[in-house]
Image (cartoon, rainbow, N blue to C red):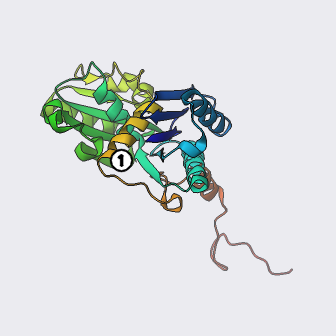
Amino acid sequence: MTLLAIESATDVVGVALIRDDSGEAERTHVGGRMHAELLAPFIEEVCVVSGCALGDIDAIAVDVGPGLFTGLRVGVATAKALAQALGLGVLGVSSLDVLAAAAHRHSGVDGARRVVSVVDARRGEVFAAAYLFDRDREAAGPIDPASVRDDRLEPIVPQVLVDWLLGMVDETGPVVVVGDGAVRYRPLLSVHPSIELDLAGELSSPPPLALARLAVERLGRGGFALPPEALLPDYRRQADARINWEERAPRVTAPGAPGAPDHRRA
């Protein structure tokens, strides 16, 4: 199988391609909001490096968030357009799951450990999910992060995140925290030595290859891709542009109410 993975949920824009017969290829760029400009060239590059054409792709995966509104929109739209052109479905994968899977595979994370993925949601909030991994359970195969996830479905403020993490520390011991939200609020999260932030810088964004590998595992376990038109991003809240527009829109006051304009002619 040849799988193409598209990552655009955070400040990182990237593409990875996995082929059964010729390994893996990855291209990434950090910062500058270059998602729209770089996705197509990166797709072309990983295909060239892997020695395949677009028509050789058997499956497409894309990070559906949560994350940055514009980045998600670009990545999901690109994945859907490409899938429609190639007659393929699209497998949507959570940014939080990708971060957790990458952290769990890291050599420094062993035993039964909690991993918490924290994505910067802007406006003083974060998206977060906790995962309780146990390597002893993996004898039968890799653990899918989604099967051990405790998801916070709404964005939360950093102090609520700290309280949540400290509760986990009391319950199960040290917690490994990754993601750009952990990087941004590192001074606040460094309140307890058992909140481990060593990996946060290395895994500040979901790695495209981690996305690709997780997608391959899910498809191998019988997961299925959605038709392109059915795939939706996980925004978790309205776009900032829409919120700003609603906040700036003039209030409509009923005629005759105090403060209502008087349109009668003098």
**How many numbered badges does the structure rendering display?**
1
Residue 128, percent from left and from top:
35, 40
Q: Answer yes or no: is residue 104 visible.
A: yes
Task: Name the outermost residue toward the front.
Answer: 21
Residue that appears at 67% across and 79% down: 255
Left or right placement of residue 175 versus residue 197 in this view: left
Residue 243, percent from left and from top:
57, 54
Q: Answer yes or no: is residue 158 visible.
A: no
Left or right placement of residue 231 versus residue 107 in this view: right
Question: Quarter of the image holding residue 52?
Answer: top right
Q: Dot 1 corresponds to which residue? A: 219
Residue that appears at 49% across and 39% down: 5
Judging from the image, what secondary structure is the residue with disc 1 in? Answer: helix
Task: Name the outermost residue toward the right.
Answer: 266
Left or right placement of residue 53 versus residue 198 in this view: right
Residues packed near mark 1 inside 10 Å, few (<14), some (14 to 19) or many (20 plus) = some
Please state which of residues 62 and 165 is positioned toward the viewer in this rendering. Answer: 62
Residue 70, percent from left and from top:
59, 45
Relative to 264, say whether 250 is above or below.
above
Q: Quadrant of the C terminus?
A: bottom right
Question: Quarter of the image holding residue 220?
Answer: top left
Residue that appears at 48% across and 46% down: 58
Q: Amino acid at mark 1?
A: Leu
Residue that appears at 33% across and 18% down: 198
Please state which of residues 28 and 177 is positioned toward the viewer in this rendering. Answer: 28
Residue 205, percent from left and from top:
46, 31
Q: Quadrant of the N terminus?
A: top left
